[in-house]
Image (cartoon, grey):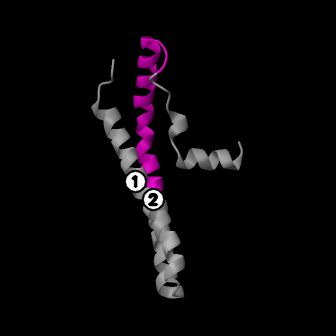
Amino acid sequence: MALRTLLYRYFFFGWLFRDASTGTALERAAAWRHNRHQARWLPTYMRRWMCCGLLFYLVGLFVECVIGAPLLSTLFYVTGLISLPGNAVMAAAWIGFKALSGPF
């Protein structure tokens, strides 16, 4: 597998899920069950994004305090901050898959 594909699969979880809005009722129910089963991986992705966000924040702190480049540090701060809404989306999806019985 190509490195680009591996990195995509390491950070983004969309490839794990099936579209539950198309097909017959049986196909949609099967896709929903599949998605509920695959939701167990969402906490793993949340940890990855949280660790990367923390790493970027620490690099920004290092660049700001040690190197003394506050403008360059904003690049790392903003990149690390992007992990927060990503984690919020993943948490909402995970809670939704665990709490909801499904649309069928």
Query: Which corner quadrant of the image does residue 36 belong to?
Result: top left
Camera sees residue 67: yes
Can residue 78 be found in the magenta stretch? no
Number of dots carrying numbers: 2
Residue drawn at (37%, 39%) of the image: 93
* Residue 2 in picture, x, y percent from top left: 71, 45
Residue assigned mark 1: 85
Q: Mark 2 Cα within 10 Å, few/some/many (few <14, many 20+)?
A: some
**Which numbered marker is on residue 6?**
none
Q: Residue flagged by tag 2: what amino acid is it?
A: Ile
Q: Disc 2 and disc 1: Cα gap in Å?
A: 6 Å
Image: 13 above or below 84 = above
Residue drawn at (31%, 39%) of the image: 95
**Which numbered marker is on residue 82?**
2
Image: 51 above or below 2 = below
Q: Residue furthest right?
A: 2
* Residue 88 in picture, x, y percent from top left: 36, 50
Camera sees residue 55: no
Find numbered disc 2 in the image and state the secondary structure of the residue it sits on: loop
The prevailing secondary structure element of the residues shown in magenta is helix
Q: Residue flagged by tag 1: what amino acid is it?
A: Pro
**Quadrant of the image for the N terminus?**
top right
Find numbered disc 1 in the image and state the secondary structure of the residue it sits on: helix
Can residue 38 be found in the magenta stretch? yes
Discs 2, 1 touching: Cβ within 8 Å: yes
* Residue 76 in picture, x, y percent from top left: 51, 70
First to last magenta residue range: 22-49
Image: 26 above or below 8 = above
**Quadrant of the image for the C terminus?**
top left
Residue drawn at (46%, 78%) of the image: 61
Residue drawn at (56%, 48%) of the image: 10
Q: Residue furthest front?
A: 71
